[in-house]
Amino acid sequence: MKALTYHGPHRVRVETVPDPILEQPDDIILRVTATAICGSDLHLYRGKIPGTDHGDIFGHEFMGEVVEAGRDVTNVQIGDRVVVPFVIACGDCFFCHLHQYAACETTNSGRGAILNKKNITAPAALFGYSKLYGGVPGGQAEYVRVPKANTGPFKVPLTLPDDKVLFLSDILPTAWQAVQNAGLDKGSSVAIFGAGPVGLLSAACARLAGAEEIFMIDHNAYRLDFARQRYGVIPINFDEIDDPAAWIIDHTKGNRGVDAVIDAVGFEAKGSLTETVLSNLKLEGSSGKALRQCIAAVRRGGVVSVPGVYAGFIHGFMFGDAFDKGLTFKMGQTHVQAYLPRLLSLIEQGLLTPEEIVTHHMPLEDAARGYEIFEKRKEDCRKVILVPG
Ligand code: NAD
Ligand code: ZN
Ligand code: ZN
């Protein structure tokens, strides 16, 4: 089959690789009908995630048709059309019973060995996200093996086209969880850092939650324009406004800052990752600029919600300010499985229309160009969907 594979920083290509096969009795094989490129893929693409090897197949946002099922699979059948959560969870451990699927303690047992320390921080395995996250081949491919198929794959009605439901795999639940974590309510104010796909869908979910004032910070004017027109955000371009947090404070009631902030940027590692980094996960040069701005922009007693991905030490994290302001931090990978029925219903009712952020559809064969366009923000790119076959 054809799949998008990694060959060093900024070097990906579509090549022929062996077809996946069933390995466990609760696996399925999916024929992928649509798969997207995520901001999280850019961390891999830039070579910033330890444990990424040449030949790795990326992709954790995908959907398709079940073409094979192991003997223990009861949740889906051959022929079903499903969206697959990017988080691989067993459904039956301590954390899965708490619906904290991204903390599943059974699917990523390899991480402790890689980091040469106890496995206490290991999150669940993820599709297409390096050995650190379980070494499971991803879905930017014609076919993909889906482990734990009784917990992940989620059936979607044939009446909804792929574009409308594909983002149930990751960025829609991620935005939803970010807004839930932010505690947004009717009349709330919020500042969302990052107008990428996660930031944009966070704005959509914030509107749905009744947020009144939504500030959005980025420096891609075309993304800010879209967010202003579609979600009525107050755009702040940090190439023009040097200190967005100070500007936000000046423009909120009582100059107190916003009720909550959402960091939809994540880490911006500058240096290269070495073996040293592998052993202690210390990211030299991570600026954490968005996170510092978040802490500055939120009011006392407010919430900092962090869907953006961080790794290792983040320099300049102002814990003293966070303490003095009495802030609450909520963050982490998304517990995708927990939100799917609710989000599908909101899509069916037309209350969420995540497909509106898509700007590019292209054949899987053009995936390398898709990465370049999305990473370099060319052609006013907001989101790329790859279509195999
Ligand atoms: P993206 O790269 O398309 O968007 C990030 C945006 O942030 C860009 O538009 C960029 O210009 C902007 N930005 C950069 N520095 C900034 C700053 N200092 N202040 C404000 N904006 C800044 O990525 P995306 O797909 O929207 O993903 C965003 C983040 O969410 C990534 O870190 C990704 O890994 C993470 N993510 C997390 C989860 C999860 O489960 N928690 C799921 C999906 C994505
Ligand atoms: Zn993603
Ligand atoms: Zn589990």
Image (tube, helix red, strand yellow):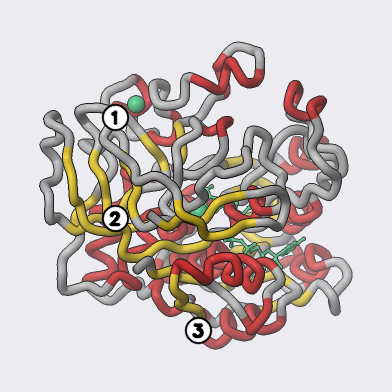
Left/right placement of residue 270 relative to residue 120 reads right
Q: Position of residue 191 (x, y in %)?
A: 64, 64
**Is disc 3 in contact with disc 2, using a CB cutoff of under 8 Å?**
no
Q: Mark 2 points at which residue?
A: 83
Amino acid carrying mark 1 in the image: Glu
Residue shown at the point (55%, 87%) measured from the top left: 229
Quarter-wise, where is residue 298 in the image? Answer: bottom right
Q: Is residue 343 left or right of residue 334?
A: left
Of residues 88 and 364, the one nearer the viewer is: 364
Badge 3 is on which residue? 230
Q: Residues within 10 Å of mark 2 (few under 14, many from 20)?
A: many
Q: Toward the viewer: 74 or 243?
A: 74
Q: Quadrant of the N terminus?
A: bottom left
Horizontal and vertical percent position of residue 357: 48, 76
Counting residues from the N terminus, which is met first, the one under dot 1 or under dot 2?
Answer: 1
Task: Tell me the CA gap for discs 3 and 2.
Answer: 26 Å
Q: In which quarter of the image is ligand 1?
A: bottom right
Q: In this view, does 342 lie above or below 68?
A: below
Residue located at (48% from left, 58% from top): 175
Q: What element carries label 3?
A: helix
Give the amino acid type for the residue marked by disc 3 in the picture: Arg
